[in-house]
Image: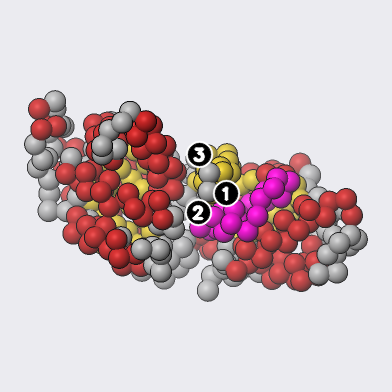
Amino acid sequence: MPRSLRYADGMGQHLTALYDTRVAEGLLRPDPTQRWILEKLEPLRTHLETARPRGFFDRFRKAEAPETLGMYLWGGVGRGKSMLMDLFHAHTGIAEKRRVHFHAFMQEIQSALHAARKTGVDDAIKPVAEQVSSKLRLLCFDEMQITDIADAMIVGRLFEKLFEAGVTVVTTSNRPPKDLYKDGLNRDLFLPFIKLLETKLEVVQLEAATDYRQDRLAGETVWFTPADAAAKSAIDLIWKDLTGGREEELVLELKGREVHLPRFWAGQVRASFADLCGKPLGPADYIALTGAAKVVIVEDIPVLSRDKSNEAKRFVTLVDTLYEAKTRLIASAAAEPEALYVEGEGSFEFERTASRLREMMAADWGAS
């Protein structure tokens, strides 16, 4: 049965009490590390709810703030980082808050900087940071990661301005701050941002023993054939279970291009075969996809005939990219993997793709 965290209820209760209620209801499995992290988040919530909101004259002085301005929560995929952050965000009783995927936020910032530069300002980051901080006291980021040189060059000064304005930041990541933008171009210029994060945010590792995302999918069918109404209904249930019924658009931006995927939540993407393979996408697009998502649902994969060789090539590239990234794949298809592409250019080599698809159906795929 799909789980629902029902974030609207319980406002005002201690975060651990909310967690214990969900455990008692069978919505979550008890995990002492998760509960310990909520204990650490509770004082931050109390500060946000009791501190005096910034007024007009506060813009002209640095905001008073606690010793740390938030939390950097990192750990392996599927350990419950997003769930904990969502619980904290939903039950912090202030209006000036936002929860957003880090990749989407940085795209917004890049667009805002572009608009600011058109006005002729000397320092475009300053007005953009002021615009963000004037509306928010709490920013919750999911999946902080830096892979783009443009983001790496602006993120330090942007966050410095946000922290100066007293904005509280809670973010999740799959890696510790010291490993952000690892091996990236001009990484030396990025190191002050790492120090800023380590100074301003409490860095906490979630060392849960269980991959709960994998656990939810363990024993589940992940390849549905044929791709009919029954398959769609089954995937609807899985999607609701994984996302709690919430979703937003994911925009992947690559060298001036944008790839829009309308169904995304907390590292999980749901798209059609036409969205991912019916358009002129390539390896860079699929690598960006695996950077944003650890579970990818691909629906309505057709039997690929000779006149669909371009789509078949893209599908092979997509599967290879998901395979190498250990990304969990859920799919609905017109046929079993071995029967998807039996004639046309590259059909013989497709046997390797079919073999990989079979391997990716295993209950423990991506767990290692």
Q: Secondary structure at mark 2?
A: helix
Q: For the residues labelled 1 and 2, say whether their Cβ atoms are less than 8 Å apart.
A: yes
CA gap between label 3 and label 1 equals 10 Å
Q: In the picture provided, is 178 more to the left or to the right than 145?
A: left
* Residue 348 position in % (x across, y down): 85, 69
What is the crowding at mark 1: few (fewer than 14 residues within 10 Å), some, or many (at least 20)?
many
| Res 36 visible | no
Residue farthest top in this picture: 56
- Give 350 or 256, whichever is nearer the viewer: 256
In the picture of the structure, the residue carrying the numbered disc 3 is 248
- The residues tagged by marks 1 and 2 sit, at their Cα atoms, a distance apart of 9 Å
Membership of 297 in magenta stretch = yes
SS at badge 3: strand
Which comes before the other along the chain, label 1 or label 2? 1
Q: Earlier in the sequence, mark 3 or mark 1?
A: 3
The amino acid sitting under disc 3 is Glu
Depth check: 85 or 301 in front?
301
- In the rendering, at what x and y percent does residue 46 appear? 18, 43
Of mark 3 and mark 2, the one earlier in the sequence is 3
Residue drawn 81% across the image and 69% down it: 349
The residue indicated by pointer 1 is: 269
Secondary structure, mark 1, is: strand
Name the front one of labels 1 and 2: 2
What residue did someone put label 2 on?
292
Q: What span is colored magenta in the figure?
A: 276-299
Q: Is residue 63 visible?
A: yes
Give the residue drawn at x 72%, y 65%. 357
Using a 10 Å C-alpha cutoff, classify the residue at mark 3 as few (fewer than 14 neighbours), some (14 to 19) or many (20 or more): some
In the rendered structure, does residue 40 fall within the stretch colored magenta?
Answer: no
